[in-house]
Image (cartoon, grey):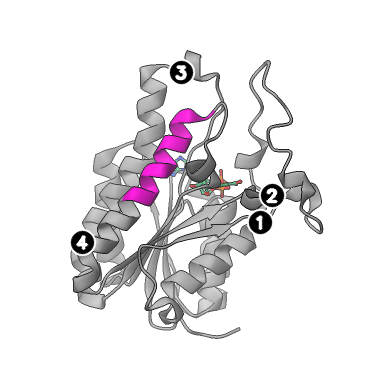
């Protein structure tokens, strides 16, 4: 595998999760030095050992809570304190729950938007002055839900649609500063998140298109499929790519 990320320092949020940990491994294998961040820090110790072996540079590990604006802002400062530079941010942390939309409380709505959208903005905003120095980039995780809606997950879909608008707006505003912003829309990826239980009375067939994808068990893509997209977008191979939305879903969206 190429070492196209050698010398880069990359902050990965959601690193304890399926897509975040797969992305951390992929970036480390390509030579990046990492800052691994998540609300859950316990799984990050073993991942840091593994990434150190793959990259040759020991990752920094930091806990934060995307539910808190203060903690989200402090994350970037902690990453900088640990590494001294920042070349890219991969915003991967996210939270998903299903509910009948008529029963969603104001608190649950706010929480979903805070974790999946506002925290992504806070982290991106804090990183901008540092990324301006390295002509760096931000890659944020949206979802197919942003493009086509998602039953029983209105707030989640709205937050993920906001990630696309945020990405395009920041890409436009900071293109002249040499900072790139891109978004990835995963389809159904095998992870803890894709096992969230259905709400009572939910239609079990709403994900039927996914099951038509040949060669993918249950129609699921793997976290490594998304990790490869992150590696491309943070690399110089994507130096002329900004404000883009890369759909990684096996074609499910078009079926
Ligand atoms: N799995 C899918 O099918 C799918 C599809 C589209 C988009 N996504 C998006 O991909 C990203 C990664 O999801 P995944 O599938 O790896 O799920 P996952 O549940 O395995 O990982 C999510 C990670 O985010 C972290 N997190 C959650 N709340 C947090 C908080 N308040 N503060 C800090 N960290 C927090 C979790 O601890 C976890 O490690 C998410 O943004 C998700 O919305 C996933």
Residue interval drawn in magenta: 153-165
Along the polypeptide, which appears first: circle 3 or circle 4? Answer: 3
Position above or below: 166 against 236: above
Relative to 252, is 6 on the left or the right?
left
In-front residue for pair 211/217: 211
Q: Secondary structure at mark 2?
A: loop
Q: Which mark is residue 173?
A: 4
Q: Secondary structure at mark 1?
A: loop
Is the C-beta separation of discs 3 and 4 under 8 Å?
A: no
Residue that badge 1 annotates: 251
Compute the Cα span from label 3 to label 1: 31 Å
Compute the Cα span from label 4 to label 2: 35 Å
Residue that badge 3 annotates: 104
Is the C-beta separation of discs 2 and 1 under 8 Å?
A: yes
Along the polypeptide, which appears first: circle 3 or circle 1? Answer: 3
Residue that badge 2 annotates: 255
Compute the Cα span from label 3 to label 4: 34 Å
In-front residue for pair 169/53: 169
Compute the Cα span from label 4 to label 1: 31 Å
**Image location (x, y in percent) of residue 153:** 52, 30
Q: Which of the two discs, 2 and 1, sits closer to the camera?
A: 2
Q: Quadrant of residue 209?
A: top right
Relative to 82, is 154 on the left or the right?
right
Compute the Cα span from label 2 to label 1: 7 Å
Is the C-beta separation of discs 4 and 2 under 8 Å?
A: no
Q: Secondary structure at mark 3?
A: loop
């Amino acid at each position: 595998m190429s070492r196209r990320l050698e010398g880069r320092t990359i902050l990965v949020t959601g690193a304890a999760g399926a897509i975040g940990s797969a992305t951390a491994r992929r970036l480390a294998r390509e030579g990046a030095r990492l800052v691994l961040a998540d609300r859950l820090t316990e799984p990050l110790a073993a991942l840091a050992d593994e990434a150190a072996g793959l990259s040759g540079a020991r990752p920094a590990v930091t806990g934060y809570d995307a539910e808190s604006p203060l903690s989200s802002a402090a994350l970037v400062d902690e990453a900088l304190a640990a590494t001294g530079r920042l070349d890219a941010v991969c915003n991967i942390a996210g939270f998903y729950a299903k509910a009948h939309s008529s029963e969603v409380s104001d608190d649950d709505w706010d929480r979903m938007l805070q974790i999946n959208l506002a925290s992504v903005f806070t982290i991106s905003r804090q990183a901008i002055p540092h990324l301006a120095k390295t002509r760096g980039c931000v890659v944020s995780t949206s979802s197919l839900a942003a493009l086509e809606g998602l039953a029983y997950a209105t707030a989640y879909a709205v937050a993920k649609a906001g990630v696309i608008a945020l990405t395009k707006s920041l890409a436009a505003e900071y293109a002249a500063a040499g900072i790139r912003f891109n978004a990835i829309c995963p389809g159904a990826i095998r992870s803890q998140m894709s096992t969230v239980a259905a709400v009572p009375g939910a239609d079990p067939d709403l994900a039927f298109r996914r099951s038509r994808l040949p060669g993918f068990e249950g129609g699921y893509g793997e976290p490594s499929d998304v990790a490869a997209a992150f590696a491309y977008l943070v690399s110089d191979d994507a130096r002329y790519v900004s404000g883009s939305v890369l759909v990684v879903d096996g074609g499910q969206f078009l079926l």
